Amino acid sequence: MSGEFNLIDKYFVGRQQQRKDVLLAAGDDCALVQVPQGLSVAISTDTLVAGTHFLPEANPSWVAHKALASNISDLAAMGATPSWVSFALTMPEPDEEWLAPFCDAFFQLADYFGIQLIGGDTTKGPLSLTLTVQGLVDPAKALRRNGAQIGDRIYVTGELGDSKAGLDVILNRDLSQKPFASELELRHYLSTPRVLVGQALLGLASSAIDISDGLISDVKHILQRSNVGASIDVSKLPVSNELVQFVGDRETALQYALTSGEEYELCFTVPEQNQGALESALAHCGAKITCIGQIRPQGTFDLHSQGEALNWSLSGYDHFK
């Protein structure tokens, strides 16, 4: 294999059926897409860098899933329907043994969510992946971070903390002998974007965010944008039995649940008047949801366990630390 265009043709062109709203995809200077009347385009860009977001020796199939799933999760957090993706790949040298399983996993996940690759770039340099995903949503209903109101209930999807435990295993192979280490490592890479949940929350949730930097950090993004506070019952945080056995006790597992980054679950708030409709709206989504607290007046932020105050000093993930 030689040359950029051979690489593109072999691994990225002709892998998917063309969506009806894609007028022109890869192969020209720009892609052309058509936006249905009444909808807006939700756009998100993320970069994953070898050595920061994944180890260079990581399974390329897992890396592909993580890269695309993390971007789709941003669309889920706004209730958008995934539509298109552009992908820029930088790598030291063309590596067919790496690219083949990477692209197989990438397109498998893309096809599952109905998202089409419409363009991108390849270049030589340190291994990194930059994806721009685009989805469609009614702008009047799109989930945002600035709609939470005092009294709203705070919910999360799934179970939290597993990704941090998996990362511990990745960074310290001595931990691979601990209970469920391999399963937790797999969960770090293979998250499930909550697209159906996000769509079901349209018209019900007052705000939403995906958990990428840790719940304790991401919920504060909602609070800051909405000018409110929060009270969180840490005892309600959903944690897996595998995580509890891996870390050794439930309290540590709960701290993992608060600080674990790259979970790609959703945190959202729901007004009291929409509580009754929530369960039925999410019945078909296949995701567990848990109420973990309530929105309070601005300036309030407390962690407690069934009413008993906690003075834990915790923070989420910082990309520059």
Image (cartoon, grey):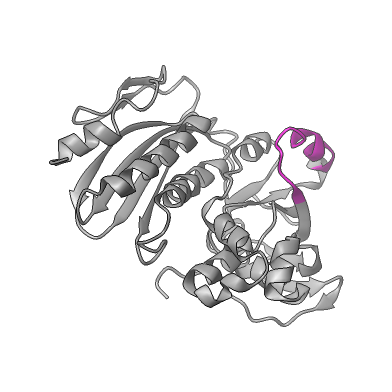
Tell me if 66 is positioned left or right of 8 in this view. Answer: right
Q: How many marks?
A: 0
Residue 303, horizontal then vertical, whole percent: 74, 73
Tell me if 285 is positioned left or right of 58 in this view. Answer: right
The answer to whether residue 300 is visible is: no
Residue occupying the point 47% across, 30% down: 111
- The magenta-colored residue range is 275-289
Question: Which of the 4 image quarters holds residue 245?
Answer: bottom right
Residue occupying the point 71% across, 63% down: 242
Of all residues, the one furthest to the top in this rendering is 20
User: Is residue 276 a member of the stretch shown in magenta?
Assistant: yes
Residue 278, horizontal then vertical, whole percent: 78, 39
Residue occupying the point 47% across, 35% down: 108
Quarter of the picture holding the C terminus: bottom left
* Residue in the foreground of this view, choosing between 304 and 24: 24
Question: Which of the 4 image quarters holds residue 83?
Answer: top left
Quarter of the picture holding the N terminus: top left
Tell me if 6 is positioned left or right of 276 in this view. Answer: left
* Residue in the foreground of this view, choosing between 175 and 133: 175
Q: Is residue 107 above or below residue 291?
A: above
The answer to whether residue 250 is visible is: yes
Residue 15, horizontal then vertical, whole percent: 35, 28
Q: Is residue 127 above or below residue 42?
A: below
User: Is residue 234 a member of the stretch shown in magenta?
Assistant: no
Of all residues, the one furthest to the left in this rendering is 3
Question: Which of the 4 image quarters holds residue 285?
Answer: top right
* Residue in the foreground of this view, choosing between 113 and 266: 113
